[in-house]
Amino acid sequence: SFLMRFASMHRLTTVLRGASVASFRRIFSSSQPHSNLTKSFAAPLLIASAGFGLASSGVFADNGWIEVDAFGVDELEDGEMKAVPTGQGKTKILIARVDGKFYAVSNSCTHAGAPMDTGLLVGARVLCPWHNAAFSVITGAAIDMPARDALDSYPVEVRGGRVVVRIPPNAEQRQAIEPAMAKPDSAKDPRSFLIVGAGPAAQVAAETLRAEGYAGGITMVTADAAAPYDRTRLSKVLGVPLDKVALRPAEWYAQHGVEVLTGKEVKLLDTQSKVAILTDGGQIRFDKVLVATGSTPRTLKVPGANLRNVHTLRTVADSAAIQASASGGKSAVVVGASFIGIEAASALKDALKVERVIVVGMEAVPMERVLGRDVGAVVQKMGEDKGVEFLMRRTVARFEGGPDGAVRKVVLDNGVELAA
Ligand SMILES: Cc1cc2nc3c(=O)[nH]c(=O)nc-3n(C[C@H](O)[C@H](O)[C@H](O)COP(=O)(O)OP(=O)(O)OC[C@H]3O[C@@H](n4cnc5c(N)ncnc54)[C@H](O)[C@@H]3O)c2cc1C
Ligand code: FES
């Protein structure tokens, strides 16, 4: 989605659509969420990072810092980037050239470790190839979700026609850099800020309040059973455990004075008396409130939509329920042929080993509305190569259940019946 937003802004539609297909090739090429892009497909789209005959050597300099003699200045054009080994274990640094200047940052995404050199450089932003986080190559700062912490940024010098980068001796062990944040102090600032919702928007809001110096109280209240987590992973790995997707570890909230109230739904905000009323009768007082309640899945208004084993996919609990009911099963039908449906179909086939996976979609090809017909056809072919079946230009008329109340059949608008 990030890439497509950029496509309309920068007229890079062809390249970015290609890159999006590369991402989907990754989805279909492995059940692993973090497998790398398939080389043969990605190579024309992405800036190559290796095999340039790099003259990389570690030379010890002052303070234990290491100088990496990366390459000659002519080896990188403006708007290009490449990864260079540092000589410290497998650590690589990413060097980018923007408006004639060279910048160096760590090459491992702070979200889940993707090699940033296989992403895209757009102006001074580098976009992660796995989940589209964006970082500034100038400062390393994280500027778009799902990453929150910065990349390490290293000084670069052009010396004798060579690009030389200085890195600290422990670059391999260095953790992601969290932005500086104000310490919570209710004596200094007695205000209370309520955030309704605990998704990424809520998380970024809480972090931004602290990063901009707010020391008062912050309370997040969520109808979900957990503190903020990365919803985007749920369709890539069905049944992924909560601790693998948490946006921040539990200690983070205590350390930064952010109270998270889970399993609590706000039914009314009384802005006159500045109180949130919960469905369980509880009340939360606030001075300021942010509503960050996200969205809910669009359900089908057809007979049988409430049968057991008819799922929507939005929460960790949904993802676990799909895993439990589909794992090793005979037949699963995915209704909806865009990002989440295609990702879920791939996970059902690859990781959960469902014998028959059928995607039902309203367009002519999957993802037609977001990627167009040509790219959608490529996505369909990739899925078919994996054994996923597609029934396009179709919709669901009804679901039929068995005596146990669980779904047995999906009946399409043309009368075709699919076992599920
Ligand atoms: C399966 C799946 C895969 C996805 N994959 C991608 C992807 O690959 N790339 C991408 O860019 N996007 C993806 N998305 C979309 C992305 O997850 C959302 O855009 C993002 O989560 C929106 O964040 P948010 O904070 O606005 O809202 P949400 O994440 O929806 O969070 C809303 C929060 O509000 C709470 N809430 C709602 N109503 C109330 C209430 N009345 N009282 C209290 N709490 C309430 C909810 O419990 C929740 O905590 C995916 C979404 C899903 C479901
Ligand atoms: S690994 Fe980079 S955004 Fe997820």
Image (spheres, rainbow, N blue to C red):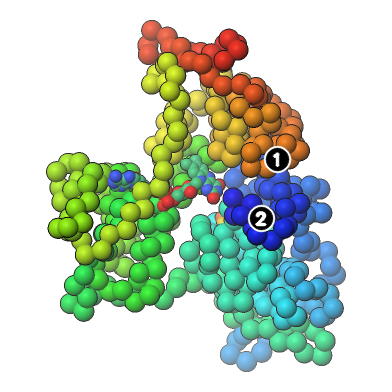
Name which residue lies at 55% across and 27% down. 334
Most extreme residue toward the top is: 403
Q: Position of residue 19 (x, y in %)?
A: 71, 51
Of 210 and 16, the residue lying toward us:
16
Report which quarter residue 371 is drawn in.
top right
| Residue of label 1 | 372
Q: Position of residue 385 (x, y in %)?
A: 74, 30
| Residue of label 2 | 8
Label 2 residue near ligand 1, CB within 8 Å: no
**Rendered position, 159 above or below 311:** below
Q: Position of residue 153 (x, y in %)?
A: 59, 77
Residue 169 visible in rendering: no
Name which residue lies at 46% across and 46% down. 231
**Rendered position, 22 above or below 352:** below
Name which residue lies at 69% across and 61% down. 10
Amino acid type, label 2? Ser
Q: Quick check: 261 left or right of 64?
A: left
Report which quarter residue 137 is drawn in.
bottom right
* Dot 2: element: helix
Q: Disc 1 to disc 2, how far (Cα)?
A: 14 Å
Amino acid type, label 1? Gly
Of 136 and 86, the residue lying toward us:
136
**Rendered position, 90 above or below 130:** below
Q: Quick check: 195 left or right of 32?
A: left
